[in-house]
Image (cartoon, rainbow, N blue to C red):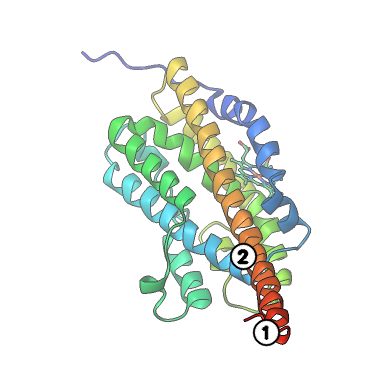
């Protein structure tokens, strides 16, 4: 008879406590901090939504593939998947041909690779990724949705990502999510430790992605500024008859 692994009844508490520092660090990245102040450009947001599309596509494909897995299977909760909502938002921000035009940034590709790697090599670690994104979306996501709406002056389109039509009571849903972790995932303490490590890595992967978007914005600004300075130099050299 196979030995039944113990459940860890405070798995969800350990996960929350074990990622607390990462949460604070993520909130304090330059991109997120400016975002919270309502400073977000459409260009950056458009890339963020495209990145999310690739990330959730990878995660949700793997969760579906692993639906019979003892660890991942119970995490397939109705109302969570974001891929369809992100496809709608991508169409809004990128236009009808969004599928041909969107691309994952380098940090996003690293994030996707990690999701696929753990899903194939050690599926229980996928829980760390699942938790980091979905519990975040159901928590801070509400605030971010409102900020995005105001910052980008959106009316009724472009915000599908924040809308969970099947989850009317987010607080209650988060309680059920925690209860699945605590009662239905056959982990032992060393599994929990490994999942916490992976969840912290998932936070870091999010931070790399945010920093990259912010960095690109700075690069974009520098390129514009350099382009301007360059054109002025060319102008003066022309006026001076040098070129
Ligand atoms: C943009 C700034 C953010 C704000 C304002 C914010 C806000 C919040 C709030 C208020 C909670 C508490 C919900 C509760 O206890 O029920 C929470 C939880 C959470 N957030 Fe964030 N968050 C932000 C960024 C992030 C990011 C970037 C991630 C990860 C990518 C994230 C992942 C999580 C997770 C996993 C939880 C669940 C904690 C738990 O109850 O186990 N958050 N967030």
Q: Tell me which label, 1 or 2, sits earlier in the chain.
A: 2
Query: Vertically, is 146 above or below 141?
Result: below
Q: Label 2: which residue? A: 220
Q: Nearer the viewer, mark 1 or mark 2?
A: 1
Which quadrant of the view contains residue 239? bottom right
Q: Position of residue 201 (x, y in %)?
A: 51, 34
Which quadrant of the view contains residue 125? top left
Query: Vertically, is 143 above or below 13?
Result: below
Q: Position of residue 64 (x, y in %)?
A: 31, 48
Binning the other alpha carbons within 10 Å of mark 2 as few (below 14), some (14 to 19) or many (20 upward) gives: few
- The front one of 168 and 241 is 241
Report how far apart the C-alphas of labels 1 and 2 lie in the structure. Answer: 27 Å
Binning the other alpha carbons within 10 Å of mark 1 as few (below 14), some (14 to 19) or many (20 upward) gives: few
Q: Position of residue 171 (x, y in %)?
A: 64, 47
Q: Residue at x 51, y 77 (%)?
A: 92
Residue 164 visible in the displayed image: no
As drawn, which residue projects farthest toward the right? Answer: 37
Q: Label 1: which residue? A: 238
- The front one of 44 and 21 is 44
Tell me whether circle 1 and circle 2 mark residues in contact (CB < 8 Å).
no
Query: In terms of secondary structure, where does tag 2 sit?
Result: helix
Q: Residue at x 63, y 34 (%)?
A: 22
Query: In terms of secondary structure, where does tag 1 sit?
Result: helix
Query: Vertically, is 221 above or below 68?
Result: below
- Image mark for residue 68: none
Q: Position of residue 211 (x, y in %)?
A: 61, 49
């Amino acid at each position: 008879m196979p030995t039944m692994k113990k459940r860890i009844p405070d798995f969800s508490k350990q996960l929350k406590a074990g990622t607390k520092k990462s949460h604070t660090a993520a909130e304090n990245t330059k991109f997120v901090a400016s975002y919270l102040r309502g400073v977000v450009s459409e260009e950056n947001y458009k890339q963020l939504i495209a990145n999310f599309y690739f990330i959730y596509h990878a995660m949700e494909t793997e969760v579906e593939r692993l639906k019979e897995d003892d660890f991942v299977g119970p995490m397939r909760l109705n109302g969570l998947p974001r891929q369809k909502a992100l496809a709608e938002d991508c169409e809004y921000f990128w236009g009808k041909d969004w599928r041909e035009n969107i691309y994952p940034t380098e940090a996003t590709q690293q994030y996707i690779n990690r999701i696929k790697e753990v899903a194939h090599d050690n599926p229980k670690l996928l829980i760390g990724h699942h938790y980091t994104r979905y519990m975040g979306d159901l928590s801070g996501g509400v605030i971010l949705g409102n900020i995005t709406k105001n910052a980008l002056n959106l009316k009724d389109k472009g915000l599908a990502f924040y809308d969970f039509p099947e989850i009317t009571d987010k607080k209650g849903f988060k309680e059920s999510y925690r209860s699945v972790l605590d009662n239905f995932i056959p982990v032992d303490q060393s599994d929990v430790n490994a999942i916490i490590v992976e969840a912290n890595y998932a936070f870091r992967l999010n931070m790399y992605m945010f920093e990259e978007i912010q960095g690109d914005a700075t690069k974009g600004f520098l390129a514009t500024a350099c382009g301007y300075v360059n054109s002025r130099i060319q102008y003066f050299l022309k006026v001076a008859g040098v070129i």
